[in-house]
Image: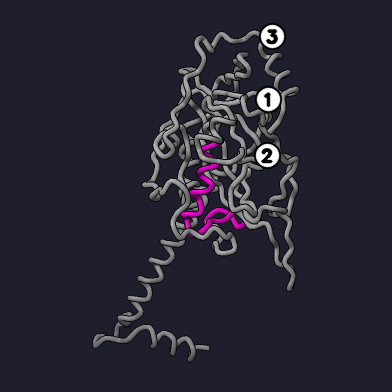
Amino acid sequence: MKSLLKTILDGLTYKNLAGHRQPRAYTVVSGLLLLLLLIAGGMALLNRYLIMRMIHVTPVAITLSRQASKETATTQPTPLPQTGEIFINCPADSADWSLTPSYISENYKVIQPACVYQGLEKTIAWVLAIREGYSRAEATAELGFTQMPMKQKDRVTIPADQGLVSVPVSFIPPDPDFTEWRLNSQGKAAVTYALRGCFRTTTVVGNRVEIWGGDYSVICLVVEDAENTHIVYALNDHIYTSTAIPTRSFLLFGYGIDETWVWLGTQESPKREIKDPAADANEREVVATLYDSWPWDAKWLASFHHLMMRTPPDNWQNMIDEGEKQAILNGLVNGENP
């Protein structure tokens, strides 16, 4: 044993003329490299801990109303160049996409090439538009869809740590003439979306491929931070305004066999009240950046799709007649769906 230790020691050091042991040059270099690796690993672990601490929040019970008291500005990365439709040479077949685990999740992944997200963004733009005073029919026409990019479903299957789970989803009224505004106390648009990763809806078991996503080969999770304090509803000349609680929700979007993205619904759980808009805005941007994306809000909609928020009805704050509310509900229930 002593001989082995002496051999190792002689390999790492040498004796100078005074008989003192000195480290060999390669020992010093190796030690410095090891120290740098340890420092880098420690910083990576610390960074992951800080990110995960921001992401994992405990859902709290809320009422059925929605979203925020104050706007928070977001700094967006330089966007990918737009062509008006899909990128030239961007693969439309999802089998040609690469989905890789992200820094923060094994289940929700990053799609490459990033140009694929442009199709998803067009559908996100539709969802934003209908939150900013465009009727469903107007938003569909403005963004060049042949039909509303949404599919009403009761449940959607998603991956979780314990395996696949079927989650209930809720949906918006599909009446083409129904109009709404999600506004803060200053009467400004107050809804922001951000990507939370995507996943394939197939699983390889042995030499078999199990398909569990139906017509949707890839599904993406998108966070909705609705920081509005009021919702204005309008249908058939009836107008009603309700108060709202700032709420964070999660939306699911599927890539269909027709090679377009559609909104599959909003997860009924988790949802939580937004109490610190600035902290949520920072976390939203950090996570979106990790997924090769950025937050989507009213400024983004105006900049990239040239859709400004429609002017809300005059005196909208005082449109609280319960008779108007009931007339709108009757119209949604009895009206024809697309």
Callout 2 environment at 10 Å: few (<14), some (14 to 19), or many (20+)? many
Callout 1 environment at 10 Å: few (<14), some (14 to 19), or many (20+)? few
Q: Is residue 280 visible?
A: no
Residue appearing at x 63%, y 19% in the figure = 235
Q: Amino acid at mark 3?
A: Gly
The x, y position of residue 255, in whole percent, is: 61, 51
Q: Is residue 74 visible?
A: yes
Q: Quadrant of the C terminus?
A: top right
Q: Which residue lies under the disc numbered 3?
A: 323
Q: CA distance from mark 1 to mark 3?
A: 20 Å
Q: Earlier in the sequence, mark 3 or mark 2?
A: 2
Residue appearing at x 24%, y 88% in the figure = 17
Residue 176 falls in which quadrant of the image?
A: top right
Q: Amino acid at mark 1?
A: Leu
Q: Amino acid at mark 2?
A: Gln
Residue 100 falls in which quadrant of the image?
A: bottom right
The x, y position of residue 25, in whole percent, is: 30, 81
